[in-house]
Image: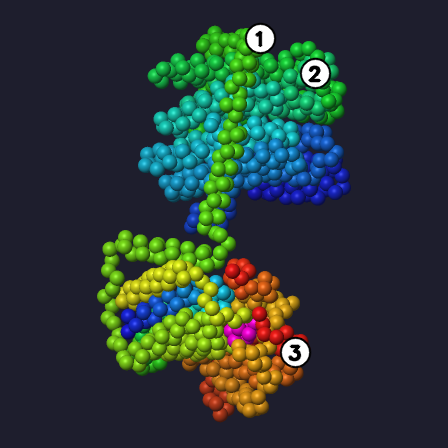
Amino acid sequence: MLLLILTVFVGAPLAAWVARFGRIQSAWAAGLVTIVAVLQLITLMPAVFEGETLIHQWDWMPRAGLNLSFRLDGLGLLFALLILGIGLLVILYARYYLAARDCMGRFYAYLLLFMGAMLGIVLSENIIQLLVFWELTSLTSFLLISYWQERADARQGARMALAVTGAGGLAMLGGFVLLGHIVGSYELSVILQSGDVIRAHPLYLPTLVLILLGAFTKSAQFPFHFWLPNAMSAPTPVSAYLHSATMVKAGVFLLARLFPALSGTPEWSALVGGAGLATLLVGAVFALFKHDLKGLLAYSTISHLGLITLLFGIGTPLAAVAGVFHIINHAIFKASLFMAAGIIDHETGSRDMRRINGLWKYMPHTAMLAMVAAAAMAGVPLLNGFLSKEMFFAEAVSASTHLRLGWLLPATVTVAGVFAVAYSFRFIHDVFFNGEPVDLPKSPHEPPRWMKVPVEMLVALCLLVGILPALTVEPLLTLASSGMLNQPVPDFDLALWHGFNIALAMSVVALVGGGLLYVARQPLFELHDRFEHRLQAKPLFDRTIGGVLGAAGAITRALDTGSLQRLVALFVAFAAVLGISGFVASDSPLTGPRDLLPVDGISLLAAGGLAAAALATVIMHRQRLVSLILIGVVGLVVSLVFVKFSAPDLALTQLSVEVVTIVLLLLALYFLPRRQQPDSHPGHRARDVVLSVVAGGGVAALAWAVLTRPYDTIADFFLANSVPGGGGTNVVNVILVDFRGYDTLGEITVLALAALGIFAMLEGLHLKGPTRDDEGRPWSPDMHPPVMASLTRLLLPLALLVSAFIFLRGHNQPGGGFIAGLVTAVALIMQYLANGVAWTQSRLPANMHPVLAMGLLVATLTGLASWLFGHPFLTSTYTYLYWPLVGKFEVASAMVFDLGVYLVVVGATLLILIHLGLMHSASHQAPADTGDYR
Amino acid sequence: MELLVALIIGVLTACGVYLVLRRRSFPVVLGLTMLSYGVNLFLFAMGRLTIGRPAVIQADAAGYADPLPQALVLTAIVISFAMTAFVIVLALKARSELDTDHVDGRGES
């Protein structure tokens, strides 16, 4: 079954690609793909006819209940046959319908995608998977309806269909999740067995309502019916396909699919039956008044979908059988009617029934076909529509005996029947008789031979099913109904003649009444014209959408004025509100029971110094150099905090990062304008003070609350396994390069990307730095004082030695790749600072990209190497070597990984700083003294 | 001691937030640096405070500090350096393209 669906999906791009070789080839390709799919389905059919339910399943995320699983039973088979069969006819028909300027490849690709999505719905066993295909039909039908992209009505109709069915799909997702929650599985075979559990569950009603929302929006049930007539701006083959056998049938398919699980409650009858009845009547009445040929068919489709829904809502097994039967019949006659309407549109250039009259003379063959199909729609005996309508009337009568005011049901149904006959009459009489054509753009004539073949085949089916139901449709119907009911089907009798009974009387009333109604249509038309503008749903929909968009825009504009300060302030304020309200709402105390550590004088002093330096940074942030020095002080004290609290690795890292950060900021400072005056509004500053105090207080309280509480840690695992598993005594480093090596690999990748991003931004950036300082004195031309230059040259080997030492001991003592990389970077940057870029570059490779790449490569290859030995990615190993003089020496593969980390850190840091420095020397060498900046 | 650390974290956050709310790019970068100090300390403090017990395995150690937050914070320090560098270069780029160091790229007001 997966193969079947894949065939269709793979066929879509194929059809688009083949279109390069010609329009006809594309149609052939689409047709062949469909035929292959049909053949695959046929090979599966015998098993289904023997009563098996085929389930093919592949596990994907079994714990979450998400599997790729397909199911083929009678119901799925019936729908798959309809989808593929009518799809094949539509492909043939569209080949003649589409004009030379329409892109064939695109059309067939969309059509096949849609067909694949529909097949996915009807063959899904997992309901979440079903929903994915369901949304795919919404998307692909959007593409199909808006196929004529240049037309505004096509775009609007497609958007409306997408909005309505997409919203319904969202509701349905909620329903499915609830259903999975109730049953404990997303597999249909489990769900269909658990009907009693579902119906007894307190969440039954919300589940039902959400799923029905999805089904009703898709099947255009009242009051969500309005998208369907607006989707008529699609090309007619699309309408014939979407609105007869597929898209709108997806909704009723879902009702049928979940019938055993959800039906049989008063809620089900009221909601499904009520919606079906309303839709049946509304659709039938409106259809009569449409002057547009496709509009009439659209409302008639709505009405027939209502009929099927009503039958499912009645809920008896026989009614369900009648519903399935009507699904088949409606698909057949409605597809042929849409195709006939398309032929008329194609050959006359108009769809307005006030202008196309008397076509019998011009296209008798087409007229004959359309008349038979319309008669089937009206429910004339000897045609398939009559049989299912008769069953429908009988079910309505038998259901009415259980209801209060029960007679209303058959009465309403008969009224709808009367209207159905009337609009079918209108379709026949107005189009093919009723005088002469009025002012048509084209002179009507018969279409090409093969364009009529699909219609002929469908009309022949109408007749065959209508006259010989037991021989043609009964086996399939029995199979599909048993698949739907999940139990043996009750006896039913598909025959033309059931004797004189109420259902027959209702049919006669409908036929006669419909004829009379059509004859007396003029006053009704006038009445309708007077009220039509009030009954349009499209303006309401447009207003709603406009309102939603307007409101969203207003909220966005109110929150986001394009000001970063405002956004940050709002963000901090909301975070504070959330944190404070969360704290107030909970009744746990702020202070926990953990024993506190004693305070000593030096710590107090350090903390005071840190707070003073931080506050001074804020106060003097306009004196940039001072604030930079002060923030350096803050960073140094932070590294002392790490020393105090047993984190030597962190202290080393913080210390070396501090140096690099300050150098970086100094370089950048040179290019940013000096500013002495405060330029924030005093009110703003007061607001910011309040916000920051609240934020700081909140974070401090949070930290206090955490610090005073005991906790469970997973650290014991790392502490216990660090030496035996990772071969190192420095647990922090072992975590970095071994236990969580994968995270580290990600982090050094981020570092490398940031460096490359900075490189890209600096490229082509030309900034002019000032040539004089604040007091107007020119900068000293002597950039590299000899004392400093000589000293740093002497220091370099020493610094590199230190970094090598830190790197090597990292696995067992504080140190490691990160810190060693930073120390190396600092040592090299000192050379740049003291000796100038030109001097240093002539001695050191300036291009840091290979270093970065090497680092990442080394780290990744170390990980991959463990695959060679059959271990998972990044498994590390270690051994002991005995060196002469040195003695026992440990070698761990994690050290190679650490080497990669080291290279990336060195490469990234130098890449950033060197390129910023290069900009510097470029601006220094600019000869023209442009005077004081600004 | 816990109170002291909580207060330090609070002061660093408050100063960082205030600086981030400024309208020129340099104080904003300073503020981000300050905030990352605060955040790193906060993350580190999630492993609770331990004095004199570094997470280096020794035969006679009485106990160890929690190594996990330390490993987390170590990479966080390096990444926040990369972020600071990225932001400051972004500020330079904005300065060169828009000829202002206002964070919203507005002209002098």
- For the residue pair A437 and A493, the one nearer the viewer reads as A437
- Label 1 marks a residue whose chain is A
Q: Nearer the viewer, mark 2 or mark 1?
A: 2
In the rendered image, residue A796, in percent from the top left (x then y), is placed at: 55, 87
Q: Main secondary structure of the magenta part?
A: helix
Q: Residue at x 48, y 78 (%)?
A: A659
Q: Are marks 3 and 2 in contact (CB under 8 Å)?
A: no
Alpha carbon distance from label 3 to label 1: 97 Å
In the rendered image, residue A917, in percent from the top left (x then y), is placed at: 59, 76
- Within 10 angstroms of label 2, few (less than 14), some, or many (20 or more) residues? few
Q: Which residues are magenta?
A: A665-671
> Which mark is drawn over residue A519?
1
The quarter of the rendered structure image containing the N terminus of chain A is top right
In the rendered image, residue A137, in percent from the top left (x then y), is placed at: 56, 37
Both labels 3 and 2 in a single chain: yes
Alpha carbon distance from label 2 to label 1: 21 Å
Q: Which residue is mark 3?
A: A925
